[in-house]
Amino acid sequence: MSHRKNDGLLGEPWRVGVLFSRSGFMALIEETQYRGTMIAIEEINARGGVNGREIVPVVYDPASDNALFRSQARRMLTEEGLSTIFGCYTSSSRKSVLPVVERLNGLLWYPTLYEGFEFSPNIIYTGAAPNQNSMALCEYLVENYGSRFYFVGSDYVYPRESNRIMRELVAERGGQVVGERYVPLNARRQDFFAVMHDIKRQMPDVIFSTVVGSATVLLYQTYHDFGLNPANMPIASLTTTEAEIRAMGCDVGEGHLTAAPYFQSISNSRNDNFVRRYRARYGEDEATNMCVEAAYFQVHMFARALECANTLDTDVLRPMVLGQSFEAPQGEVRIDPKCSHTNVWSRIGRATRSGQFEILRQSLSPVLADPYLIAARAAV
Amino acid sequence: MSRTAGREADTRKRRVDLSGARVVVCAETDSHFETWMRELRRQRAEVTLIWPPPRRFQDGMDLLICEYFPKVAEVLPWEPGEAGAALVLLLPQSGLHDPAEIAAAAPHGVVSRPFTAPAVVAAAQVAWSQFRYEQRLRERIAQLDENLRSIRFVERAKLILMAEKGMTEPAAYRHLREMAMQQRVSVVEVADAVIRRSELTL
């Protein structure tokens, strides 16, 4: 940042932690969350910072290693003297950081969808919970493709828990899970061969994928190489974004489905401006995605809360965060004061040849976060 | 002392004593050192002395009584929030210590030099008690989380049994419990089996 932008800023800067993997097998998506965070910080600083003070990011690279997530979070909260951290993509990395932020009373802003069934007073959850993406996706798939599901996921906590929920949703709609396979988190191409052979034997109506990271690209490419057709057996995912579609090749991703609060193709002026600024900052070819957007709007929500609190002390800042609303690129979002999760929009998109998502269905308003599926129990 | 009063005294003793606790002491020796070490051993603690401080302590202790020094948190074999043992820091007589360094180590107790033997023993007892209480709370939260996840499966399995076998809700739950007891598995595992069997017969 140039000195010119800092002109007029008074006092010590607000130092915040940024903890996304910029190397390793999760870098593909976490790099985009890093970018979303940085562009928001730059925007806020360009407008004069918060209460006349600049936000300064302290950036670490945990390199897709949960042990590094844990130790770097500790370093941020102790040696660096920080209290607010923006970070984590995988649930396993969040669960590694959670005891540290709880014990040292930090505040982790987590901009990723996850499997729900968690509440920590030291985490602000800004991605979708299962009632905000899985339920709508399951309903759409059963209505439009059929009720025989095949699950394939990376072998860690998020896919297993997410599949447990999806299994229940499928059963509620009279459907059936005809196969369930897991591959290593840093899977290789050949790990998907046996999965695809099994899929060809079972011929499900839908493949529900919870594969994450670089392995996502390999799953879709292997599917493509096996000559399967997304028109009658799509891969449906909660995690495959514009970033992964671009990495796998737009022709490979075309026709597959994703449920998310945000797609770049959303048509409103806030999103148009967001996409324009993102491209101007990172390149005309670069696409936004749900992870960029959540990473972006959560920094703006943090800045608004900080403006009121005028301190990074978690005990003062957190009450200012809870209940706050923000006009995000996806539409208006709100942090539910009861559960620290965000009321986000529910959308189903189908990937197009251009690498974007055509929005097939969307909620009429933000969906209330229900991380423990308490309201959803009535439907069981 | 009456028998009841005696039992109460025994209970109080059990709550605070260090009997059998594996205590590691990492402290400089001074003229009082032997006195408070003897006092710890009188509490039936298994005391091991380590000095100078290692680059990193090993797991396998219940209580660590450690001299304060800069970056003391880095020699602990755990991260804050996941402590594997109770921690008491001994603060220097000089008064030169960094509160941020102490916070980073997240101790369960601190004692400032100079201290008496009863003071260090009391701090050790309080830390040990606090640590075990924390552990119980952590276990309770983990169990509650698991219960919240699994309650949905039990509810669903009950509905399946009610539909398939015409059972009432209490009867369906009794059936799940009895199956679990017979098979010596949890109710959740039985519920999961009922759901999966039901899916296969669709």
Image: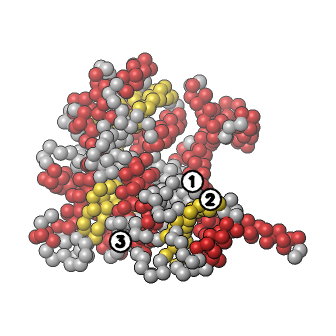
How far is mark 1 from mark 3, CA to CA? 37 Å
Question: What amino acid type should be assigned to the residue bearing mark 3?
Answer: Leu
Residue matched to label 1: B60
> Above or below — where is B156 with respect to A124?
above
Residue matched to label 2: B22
- Eye-nearest disc, 3 or 2: 2
Q: Residue at x 47, y 63 (%)?
A: B53
Say whether residue B8 is left or right of residue B140.
right
> Above or below — where is B170 with respect to A175?
below
Residue furthest to the top in view is A201
- Eye-nearest disc, 1 or 3: 1
| Contact flag, marks 2 and 1 (Cβ < 8 Å) | yes
The quadrant holding residue A231 is top left
In this rendered view, identify the residue nearer to me: A65 or B172. Answer: A65
The image shows a total of numbered marks equal to 3
* Residue under disc 3 on the same chain as residue under disc 2: no
Q: Earlier in the sequence, mark 2 or mark 1?
A: 2
> Above or below — where is B134 with respect to A283?
below
Question: What amino acid type should be assigned to the residue bearing mark 2?
Answer: Arg
The quadrant holding residue A85 is bottom left
Residue matched to label 3: A312
Question: What amino acid type should be assigned to the residue bearing mark 1?
Answer: Gly
How far is mark 2 from mark 1, CA to CA? 8 Å
Q: Position of residue B7 (x, y in %)?
A: 83, 68
* Residue under disc 2 on the same chain as residue under disc 1: yes
In this rendered view, identify the residue nearer to me: A361 or A137. Answer: A137
Within 10 angstroms of label 2, few (less than 14), some, or many (20 or more) residues?
some
